[in-house]
Amino acid sequence: MDVITQLESILPTVSNVADRVRSDQFDEPTPCASYKVRDLFSHMIAGASQFAPQLRGDPSAAVADPDSLSDEERPAALRAALEDLLAAAKSPGALGQTVHAPFGAVPGEVLARFLTVDAMVHTWDIATATGQKYDPPEELAASVLATAHDLIAADMRDGDTFATETPVPADASTLVRLVAFTGRAVGV
């Protein structure tokens, strides 16, 4: 599955989960170490607003400050940031140009592929923290898991970006295998 198809499938589900977060749930801890639900919203909004301009070839564009948002504004801000990110990824030449990711200068396609992993895993984090069901299509989860295996290097497992892979039950879903691969404890 190509990265644009992945993004087109993942990003609406991120927004659907985000829209169902209740105002009393933003302080809930998540499976992503040291992050509350509010922190993951901020992380995802900031990332999308940082990388969209880079994919358009304008790395000097202003980046959104999600910490200034009220909790009620966060779901709409996340949706807008993700829609802009998808539009940027689809812009001419976006996937072929060099962009600056936290792990170095890479082609836009590598960044976009990394963002599919980030979006799917953080959506699971938010859904888990807020008691929501999150069940992306198997083909999509398998494609993103393959991307994670391709992109997550040993030196990225610093406990901050990613932790050590955790064990999963033999019958674990592909989504659970993905989040365990990124270091989330999934309960064996």
Image (cartoon, grey):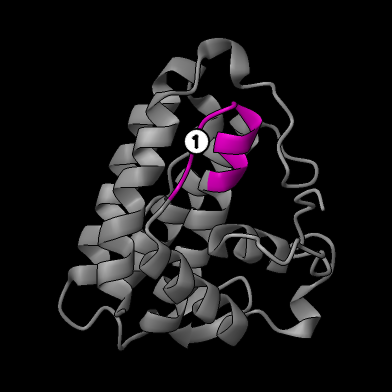
Q: In this rendering, is residue 6 above or below 94?
A: above
Q: Amino acid at mark 1?
A: Lys
In-front residue for pair 128/14:
128
Direction from residue 155 to residue 146 in the image, left or right = left
Magenta stretch holds residue 166: no
**Labels in figure, total:** 1
Q: Quadrant of the N terminus?
A: bottom left
Magenta stretch holds residue 134: yes
Residue at 52% of width from left, 26% of height from top?
68
Q: In this rendering, is residue 1 above or below 183?
A: below
- Where does residue 160 sit, x and y in percent of width and height? 79, 59
Question: Magenta residues, as a range?
Answer: 124-135
Direction from residue 156 to residue 141 in the image, left or right = left
- Whether residue 26 is visible, yes or no, is yes
Residue at 73% of width from left, 43% of height from top?
31
Residue at 53% of width from left, 12% of height from top?
23
Q: Which residue is mark 1?
A: 133
- Where does residue 49 sit, x and y in percent of width and height? 40, 51
- Where does residue 80 sit, x and y in percent of width and height? 29, 40
- Where does residue 180 sit, x and y in percent of width and height? 71, 62
State the image quarter where residue 48 is shown.
bottom left
Identify the residue at the far front of this view. 171
Using a 10 Å C-alpha cutoff, classify the residue at mark 1 as few (fewer than 14 neighbours), some (14 to 19) or many (20 or more): few
Residue at 52% of width from left, 65% of height from top?
117
Q: In this rendering, is residue 131 above or below 184?
A: above
Q: In this rendering, is residue 82 above or below 8?
A: above
Identify the residue at the far left of this view. 92
